[in-house]
Amino acid sequence: MEAPARSLLSVARSRGRSVVTQARSVAPLRLLAPTSRGDAAWVYQSSLGGGFVGGDAIELDVDVAAGARLFLTSQASSKVYRRAVSRCRVNASVGAGGVLVAWPDPIACFAGAAFDQRQRFRLARSAGLIAVDAWTAGRVAHGERWAFARLALRTEIELDGVPVLADAVVVSPAHGGLAARMADAQAFATIAVAGEVFASAVQTIGRAVAARGVAAQPRISASVWPWGAVVRIAAATTEQLVAGIHTMVGASARDVLGADPFVRKW
């Protein structure tokens, strides 16, 4: 695939609110910025075809200026259509005291699809990041359970120029039958929480996960570090996964955004 043109999104603080100062969408990506109910900027990623088709390659650069706050999400689940081979790259920077909540809906790969996503977040140490990376077994209702060809996800985080996380997940039947390996789980998420803004939230997450019983559903694990935390969730259904994500980081997101962006999303 040829190198795609880059989409740009910039958010800054102005008159007590976070506002979008630049939004350039390059097809197939569309960036929608409705008025938010809080003091953060809310931006929704959409596409011309409602998902990724063969050859789609998205490059999105995001800049959250010092003190600004951005909720970056998707209009709906990120569909990767049948036999499509596509990719997405997100490069984001967050200035001092700024916050980025990157929380798209789960990725759903159709039969034969291959999708490669790489996200890189550069934060000032005094900033904050919640990055949710969720995906499912595919179109289970249509009989396409673990029928995709390959899913590759990578997330990197730097604090003040120092790398603190490089997390990669590759899901492929080339490594063995997926249905048998995944057992009863059909939806997964990795949540990265970083920066001083969420220091207390990280400790709360660690305690909450430690207090869960071994039989609790969905299955949730967490690793807490000086810079933040990584939370992993495995669920039997997408609905269960979404509920688990909200349990872990929903309150923290609402607090920094000044409102709940999910109240009337669907």
Image (tube, helix red, strand yellow):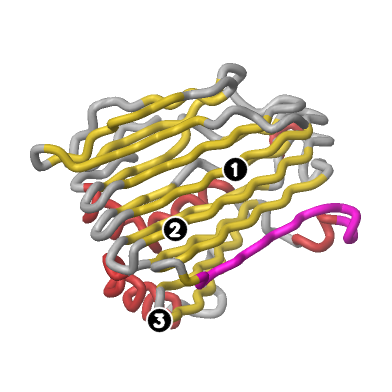
Residue 233, compared with residue 68, is above or below; it is: below
Between circles 1 and 3, the one closer to the viewer is 1
- How many numbered marks have been drawn onto this rendered protein structure? 3
Badge 1 crowding class, 10 Å Cα cut-off, few under 14, some 14 to 19, many 20 or more, is some
Q: Which amino acid does label 1 sit on?
A: Arg
Q: Is the magenta stretch mostly helix, strand or loop?
A: strand
Q: What residue type is labelled 3?
A: Pro
Q: Which residue is drawn at 30% across and 61% down?
A: 127
Task: State the extent of the magenta-drawn residues as a range.
Answer: 163-177
Q: Which residue is drawn at 38% across and 44% down?
A: 63
Check residue 122 in the rendering and tell me which mark sits there, or answer none.
2
x then y, percent, for residue 206: 40, 78
Q: Which residue is drawn at 9% across and 38% down?
A: 15
Label 3 secondary element:
loop
Label 2 secondary element:
strand
- Circles 2 and 3: CB distance less than 8 Å? no
Magenta span has 176? Answer: yes
x then y, percent, for residue 57: 67, 32
Q: What residue type is labelled 2?
A: Arg
Horizontal side of residue 185 vs 230, given as left or right: right
Check residue 98 in the rendering and tell me which mark sits there, or answer none.
none
- Which residue in the protein does label 1 denote? 89
Between circles 2 and 3, the one closer to the viewer is 2
Q: Residue at x 57, y 17 (%)?
A: 48
x then y, percent, for residue 256: 23, 54
